[in-house]
Image (tube, rainbow, N blue to C red):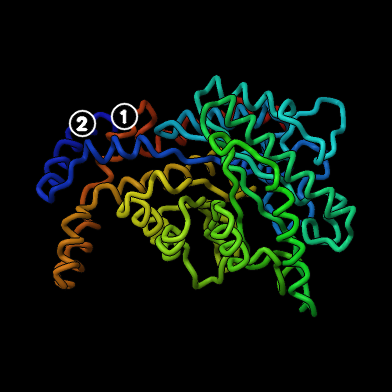
Amino acid sequence: MISDNTGKMYELARAQYAAMGVDTEAAMARLEAIPISLHCWQGDDVSGFESDAGLTGGGIQATGNYPGRARNAEELRSDLDKALDVIPGKHRVNLHAIYAETGSRKVERNELLPEHFAGWIDWARANGIGLDFNPSFFSHPLADAGFTLTSLDDGIRRFWVEHGIACRRIGEAMGRALGTPCINNVWIADGSKDIPVDRFKPRELLKRSLDEIFAEDVDQRFNRDALESKLFGIGSECFVPGSHEFYMGYAAQNGKLYCMDAGHYHPTEVISDKISSMLIFLDEILLHVSRGVRWDSDHVVILNDELRAIAEEVIRNNFESRIHIGLDFFDASINRVAAWVIGCRSMLRALLMALLEPTAKLREIEAAGDYTSRLALLEELKGMPAAAVWDHYCVRKGVPVGPAWLDEVKSYESSVLPARQ
């Protein structure tokens, strides 16, 4: 078994890293303090609990029909429990407003209250984790025209402003109840399929709407506001009011967190290169770590070059306290619990690899202008035994080593998911 040799392999790896000036014990301790926010919508294909209609509009789409989608809060929480059981460390869960539990009563989104998320708060408290939150500006009749906070219809715009206000109150209640700030992230799907004549008016309306949403004083100790940009969506290919430039300016001017989603830019852009620029001007930022394939396709996060580059930017600059890391993908073509586990474990492995880098030594070499040694050392690091440290970390945290976690998820699939057909 892999686990039988993890101790021996770790001691060898520890010595190798020590020779490079890296303390593996310190690296694992630092990793333990970094929570990842798991997005609940991977478990049910962004359907929510409002109706059986599921995801409609919003420029987003879940593809695939793998059996076992969660149909209610109990099933979704059960799936999250299983995922968290095989992910090392203590993490968080990110909710959308459409996951409210309102019983048999229909509650409009602008009337949502903290009590409609009491089940989630109780579950999070029992598990010792924090919650993050998002207003849901999609999959609703008043979003069918493609405009919410930028709508020219005052009644529609007012409805969505009230929804944003209600969600900030819910976020504050979550943070207060759980003793950890709730990151409350605003993303709207507003936009135009074809080329608009007036690009200014929608952005003017968006600023006005945001000003109205944020006018109410909410305790920053318990609720932190974030704004997420997007380049385009399905049905909004030509124009999106909430662009990178718009939200970057708004966040900097108003002291909000700026959320960067890995799939929300041009295909040749990467968010790893934007992190240091953002944190020159902002106190904190939010990352939605995803994987775009040819477009903003929200594929499951894997340990690729960009994920490693994101982790390196966080760790090399000691940004852990200023960056909130959340996952954001939805793949309905594979086991949904496994998708969470693959994505989160990949993110954690990328962070650990960055923590096992002799950053101080590399900075010294770079400052001296010795770019030959910098390149050589960075390449040698790729062959270092980071996997042995990762396996040892998993053992310490009491989770399966290597692919053994998949056996647990497959067992859960065979015993629990068939009843959902």
Instruction: Please give left or right for residue 2 compared with residue 248 in the image.
Output: left
Kind of element beneath mark 1 = helix
At horizontal 88% and vertical 57% (from top left) the residue drawn is 154
Instruction: Please give left or right for residue 326 compared with residue 272 in the image.
Output: right
Q: Which kind of residue does numbered mark 2 sit on?
A: Gly
In the rendered view, would you say 78 is above or below 274?
Answer: above
Quadrant of the rendered structure where residue 175 is? top right
Q: Is residue 168 visible?
A: yes
Q: Which residue is mark 1?
A: 395
The answer to whether mark 2 and mark 1 are in CB contact below 8 A is: yes
At horizontal 32% and vertical 49% (from top left) the residue drawn is 318
Q: Which kind of residue does numbered mark 1 sit on?
A: Val
Kind of element beneath mark 2 = helix
Q: Is residue 335 visible?
A: no
**Picture coordinates of residue 80 (x, y %)?**
57, 32
Quadrant including the N terminus: top left
Quadrant of the rendered structure where residue 162 is? top right
At horizontal 67% and vertical 30% (from top left) the residue drawn is 418
In the rendered view, would you say 184 is above or below 75?
Answer: below
Marker disc for residue 191 = none
**Picture coordinates of residue 391 (x, y %)?**
30, 37
Instruction: Please give left or right for residue 223 compared with residue 280 in the image.
Output: right
Marker disc for residue 7 = 2
Quadrant of the rendered structure where residue 399 is? top left
**N-terminal-most mark, 2 or 1:** 2
